[in-house]
Image (spheres, rainbow, N blue to C red):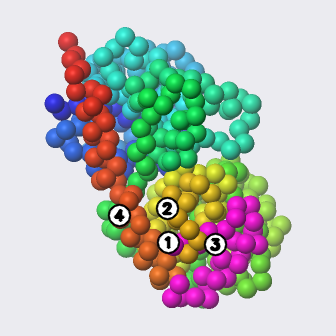
Amino acid sequence: MRLKVLQLGSPTGLYGAERWILALIKHLDPQKIETIVGVILDDPALEAPLLKEAARLGFKTAAIKAIGRFNWEAVKKLRRLLKEEKIHVLHTHGYKQDLLGFLATRGLPTRIIATPHGWSKEPDFKLACYEALNRLVFYGLDRVVPLSRELYQGLWRLPGLKKKLLLIENAVDLHEIENVKEIPAEVKKVREKGYLVVGYIGQLIHRKGIDVLLNALTAPGLEDLFLFVVGEGPLRGKLRNLVQQLGLADRVVFTGFRPDRLSFLRGFDFFILPSRLEGIPRCLMEAMGMGKPVVASDIEGVRALIPEDGSGGLLFPKDDPQALAQKLILLKKDLALRRRLGRQAAEIVRQKFSASRMARAYENLYQEIASNISWR
């Protein structure tokens, strides 16, 4: 039976979770799964780039307008959509989507699963309450499918939740990566000046540790490294001030959000991820899949991709800019090491973390929980 699946994501941007949704739906078998991509538009200023990209790829989309942080109209409108489209599986991404999906599916034949994409390391009181509520909501869902072993183990410890858990590890769209050939003009200009180009791609938030990377760049011996920070987030102003304080203004560029982020990645000599906390980071998978040598903090989510220092990438202790600087100096000096790490990285991603492998696992899950559903 061909199933209808609604992917409910965030309207705010194209970050890790939204790109994950796009990678998944592109590799689902359309003979088995009909996909609709939806968002809850809770702010009239939001443009829902997830829907724009999904529509560009040829998928049906749905924007549910319900202004406000929590509006009961969102539940009613989502429920109406589920009934009108006769959705077999609602797949939610994020604590708000999980809660609204749980409420909207009550009494309907629609099955609901959630994929947790990560938790905040240092949440404020309000966010901590939301995330605690999110974990309670999981008990009312049909399946909870974390995308990393770390997230799985954290949820496995919750009493009574084990039977709902299924680990399907994160993955990356290799076709998208392989098709990127061009390098942005900004990167070419920097190369012409004789710099090695390094980069970070992702949100500008505390847990990503960008401040650690900036401090590392002040180390002697790294004067010929130029950093592109590709992404947007609430810490942009503070990080730009830190760049000025550290005297790095002529060697660091903040590009903001760029739809051509993979073109920047193609132009990097190596990629740096200084995070304090991760699931299995999509940006790191993309860099490794492209064959880029990478340096990343030695944390659990990263170790799923780089099992040990020097095997597929270099690892450094989190929050240690001096240790990161030493790894960067090592990579800068050793071209043979960069090439070896790049080859190893690409092979790790191809064998274990392809989007096609992930899509087959989700197809099986959708069929398992929804094959006996009958809409009248």
Q: Earlier in the sequence, mark 2 or mark 3?
A: 3
Residue 25, picture quadrant: top left
Image quarter in which the N terminus is found: top left
Kind of residue at badge 2? Leu
* Residue designated by label 4: 351
Q: Which residues are magenta?
A: 311-337
Asked if the residue at tag 3 contacts the one at tag 2, i.e. Cβ–Cβ closer than 8 Å, the answer is no
Outermost residue, right direction? 245
Residue 76, picture quadrant: top left
Give SS at disc 3. Answer: strand
Residue beneath the point at 42% across and 17% down: 104
Give SS at disc 1. Answer: loop
Give SS at disc 4. Answer: helix
Return the x and y of residue 78 as percentages of the image width and height.
40, 21
Within-10-Å neighbours for mark 4: few <14, some 14–19, many 20+ = few
Image quarter in which the C terminus is found: top left
> Disc 3 vs disc 1: which is toward the camera?
1
Within-10-Å neighbours for mark 2: few <14, some 14–19, many 20+ = many
Q: CA distance from mark 3 to mark 4?
A: 30 Å
> Disc 2 vs disc 3: which is toward the camera?
2
Kind of residue at badge 3? Leu
Kind of residue at badge 1? Gly
* Residue designated by label 1: 312
* Residue designated by label 3: 227
User: Which mark, by number, is residue 305?
Assistant: 2
